[in-house]
Image (cartoon, rainbow, N blue to C red):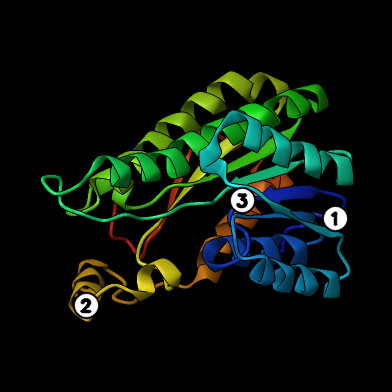
Amino acid sequence: MFDLTGKTALVTGGSRGLGRAIALALAGQGADVAINYRGNAEAAEEVAQQITGLGRRVITIQGDTSEGREACEAMVKAALGEFGSIDILVNNAGITRDNLIMRMDAEEWDAVIDTNLSGPFWMTRAIARPMLKARSGRIINMSSAAGRMGNAGQANYAAAKAGLIGLTKTTARELASRGITCNAIAPGLITTDLTADLPETATEALKGMTPLGYIGSVDDVAAAAVYFASDEARYVTGQVLGVDGGIVMGS
């Protein structure tokens, strides 16, 4: 596997689901980890205890990425204060507020855009200066198959995740000269808290659209994050990796 010994990572939304799996996977390969969480301190502490059990340093940082520049800068400052540097940023925090376009209200639209798109922008902006100074870094954005193909009832979510792909490519171009890479992972149907509430009919329909014919696990996505965080991915930037069983194919 990939060796992340001596590296430090900040994972937003790291207390559950994909974020939890990614935080544990990074720690499993040797990284020290800062876990950001919005409200579930107990879940964040449980992940922290597991990381401590792996022999890695860990801190938990409460904060809401949707609150903008100051909140995101505070999270980065807290991680830097503990570890001295941040080598890996995983922009994972995300929410859903599903509704049809004709029924979607301003709160549903704004909440998802603020968390899923604006949050990663402000986190990236906050981490850019220390990474530029270090002349190295790995930024990993969690997009979605919905951002590449659209999904009925998720105009806000799909728009945010598509925007995140644009942010990924722009960040990659702007920061490449300083040895910083930025890539995105676009999961398909993955067993998480967000997908647990899907009606069985919707789940079966998505499985039917997936060439491999089954639902992926958080570990499948975490493995991709570990790769992007590693030195082996040093020549990979501005890319979108679909971990989706083949539901989206092509560029």
User: Residue drawn 70% across and 48% down?
Assistant: 10
Q: Is residue 116 left or right of residue 134?
A: left
Q: Which residue is mark 3?
A: 12
Q: Decide which of 85, 48 is in the foreground and name it.
A: 48
Q: Which residue is mark 2?
A: 204
Dot 3 falls on a residue whose secondary structure is loop
The CA span between labels 2 and 3 is 30 Å
User: Residue drawn 40% across and 66% down?
Assistant: 194
The amino acid beneath tag 3 is: Thr
The x, y position of residue 238, in whole percent, is: 50, 33
The CA span between labels 3 and 1 is 20 Å
Q: Is residue 125 left or right of residue 61?
A: left
Circle 1 Cα neighbour tier, 10 Å, few/some/many (<14 / 14–19 / ≥20): some
Dot 2 falls on a residue whose secondary structure is helix
Circle 2 Cα neighbour tier, 10 Å, few/some/many (<14 / 14–19 / ≥20): some
User: Residue drawn 82% across and 27% down?
Assistant: 134
